[in-house]
Image (cartoon, helix red, strand yellow):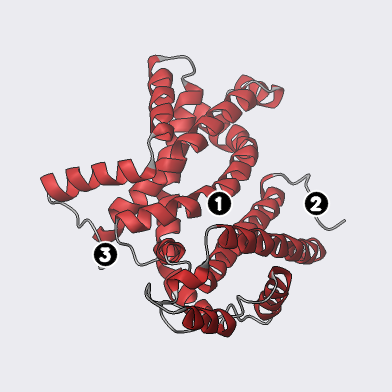
Amino acid sequence: MIRYTLLRLIQLIPSLIGLSIILFILMRIGGDPVAHLVRPEASPDEVAAVRAAYGFDRPLHEQYLSSIGRILAGDFGESVRFRSPAMPLVLERLPATLQLALSALVVALLIAIPAGLIAAIFQNSPLDITITLTSTLGRAMPNYWLGIMLILLFGVQLRWLPVSGTGDWRNLVLPATTLGIGIAPALSRLLRSSMIEVLRREYVVTARAKGLKESLVVLRHAMRNALIPFVTIFGLQMAWLLGGAVIVEEVFAWPGMGRLIYRSVQVRDLAVVQAGVFIFALIVMIANLLVDLSYALLDPRINYND
């Protein structure tokens, strides 16, 4: 397993380089970054001086090679907005984003696992239909709209929860619920489908024929195998979760990486955007690696030592 893990970690390098190329191109297509570094009434000489100071006067390929060289050394440049190194700014916001993401995952699992199991056990019943319709509706709701509705209900009307900022656990409830509800429908529908398929297999029928309790059949014999495709999608949802965090953090004024990147995109703060997206991509890739390694725990037939 150690050899497999090292190989997967090495495979992250080309992906990150490809991401840096795409991001570099997109940020240049979006407009001239120098326009956000000078006063509107700046003279051509002042604009040229700023362009030369930041290296924007050089050919694009030279700009990219220079930036990738600094990135490999861990230097993403200086933020033009905060006038300080970009990576420390991003890492400072990382704990808040991880706290929000992990809380949202807990919310999603608390909703998805019971809903998926109940829908599978009572297949085609009114309860199953209700859960399926609710999942479809939940998947269709945009994060920003759901967040605003939760703010209006629990923050403005009922005044039960704070609507922005950080503090104690109550500040985390609304943004985590908004993100968790976004990914719970897909997870619950997948678990339902996987459980229905597993419950029809011969070893489950045999376990029932032996007189085992239905709860024991479902939880010990069926659910473990049903979790393999569930875990796969669970890992893929990490990318969606972090992408949704950008909007949710802005809606709830949550001081995380997503809000920092959103504000940096608005002012073409390239260094912060590159550092933030790099960290986001690294988190998603590591999450996918952990998902792959978890297969061996769920299915003993999978062996990464070969």
- Disc 2 crowd, CA 10 A, few/some/many (<14, 14-19, 20+): few
Quadrant of the image occupied by residue 209: top right
Asked whether residue 110 appears in the rendered view, the answer is: no
Give the residue at x 70% y 22%.
202
The C terminus lies in quadrant: bottom right
Residue 89 position within the rendered picture, expressed as x and y whole percent measured from the top left: 46, 77
Q: Which of 132 and 182 is in front in this view?
A: 182
Where residue 100 sits: x, y (%)?
A: 40, 59
- Judge whether 211 appears above or below 82 on screen: above
Front-most of 194 and 271? Answer: 271
| Circle 2 or circle 1, nearest the eye | 1
> What amino acid is labelled 3 in the image?
Gly
Q: How many marks?
A: 3
Residue highlighted by disc 2: 303
Q: Name the residue under label 1.
A: 239
Front position among marks 2 and 3: 3
SS of the residue under disc 3: loop
Residue 165 numbered mark, or none: 3
